[in-house]
Each structure stands twice: as C-alpha cells, then as structure tokens.
Image: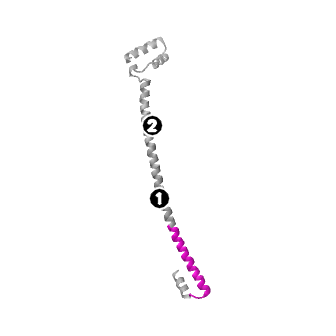
C-alpha cells in the first residue's frame, strides 16, 4: 500500500467514523508492504544464528576467564611461597640474634655473680 493509498483510506475512515477510530484503524494496518515485513521463520533463523554465535563467544570467554583465574592462582601461590620463605629467614635471623643476646646476658650474669671476667664485662658494657 502506497502512502497515497494510506492517505485516502485515512480520509475515508475519518468521513465514516470519528478521528479517534480512524487513527485506531490505521494503526491496525501494516506500516509497510507485506513483502517488506519480517516473517517469523526469518526472525527465528536470524535469532538462532545470533544466539549460537553469542553462546560460542560466551563459551570462549568462560574458558579464557578460567585460564586467567588459574594463572592468577598459580602466581599467587608462588608469591605467597616466596613471602613465607622470606618470613622464615627473617624469623631465623631474629632467633639467632635473640639467642646471642641471651648468651651475652647469661655471661654477664655469671661474670657478675662470680666476680671473674670483669674485663670482659667492662668491654661488653662499653660496647652496648
């Protein structure tokens, strides 16, 4: 139906009915020739193809996300293992330092109680 035919039909509807009903009748007509309208089958084919492509892309993205998460977990494990080893080494250093301090204090106590090693006590007192 051409635009001219649509205009004539609208004018006829307005003559036979009121404007509101004429508008309603025109809204019930297809806005374009029926050959230009999409059929249900065509729409289903297009949507099916689009959905299949979307599902494939979604699957690829999910696989990529899983690989990324696995890689990040492995990197985190390595980082945490390195940090734990650094913490252990630091704890060993502190332990050795505390043992050394305890030995020095024990020697100072023994020297003070026994009265011997006075020169060593004086030397240690001067050092700290």
Picture layout, residue 74 above or below residue 110 = above
Q: Which residue position is annotated with label 1?
A: 79
Q: Which residue is nearer to you in this view: 12 or 84?
A: 84
Q: Main secondary structure of the magenta part?
A: helix
- The structure residue drawn at horizontal position 48% and vertical position 53%, both measured from the top left corner, is 73
Q: Is residue 34 left or right of residue 17?
A: left
Q: Which residue position is annotated with label 2?
A: 55
Picture layout, residue 58 above or below residue 18 = below
Q: Which residue is nearer to you in this view: 16 or 35?
A: 35
Q: Which element carries disc 2, helix, strand or loop?
A: helix
Q: Is residue 99 a member of the stretch shown in magenta?
A: yes
- The structure residue drawn at horizontal position 50% and vertical position 68%, both measured from the top left corner, is 90
User: From this viewpoint, which residue is outermost toward the right?
Assistant: 113
Tell me if mark 2 has few (under 14), some (14-19) or many (20+) residues whose alpha carbon lies within 10 angstroms of its own: few
Q: Which element carries disc 1, helix, strand or loop?
A: helix
Q: How much space separates mark 1 and mark 2, taking CA atoms?
A: 36 Å
Q: Quadrant of residue 31?
A: top left
Residue span colored magenta: 89-117
Q: Where's residue 69, x and y in %?
A: 47, 49
């Amino acid at each position: 139906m051409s635009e001219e035919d649509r205009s004539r039909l609208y004018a006829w509807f307005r003559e036979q009915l009121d404007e509101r009903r004429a508008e309603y009748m025109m809204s019930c007509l297809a806005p374009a020739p029926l050959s230009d309208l999409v059929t249900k089958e065509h729409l289903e084919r297009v949507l099916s193809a689009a959905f299949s492509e979307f599902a494939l892309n979604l699957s690829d993205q999910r696989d990529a996300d899983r690989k990324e998460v696995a890689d990040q977990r492995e990197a985190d494990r390595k980082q945490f293992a390195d940090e734990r080893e650094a913490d252990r080494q630091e704890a060993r250093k502190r332990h050795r330092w505390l043992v050394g301090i305890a030995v020095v204090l024990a020697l100072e106590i023994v020297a003070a109680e026994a009265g011997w090693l006075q020169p060593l006590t004086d030397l240690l007192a001067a050092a700290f």
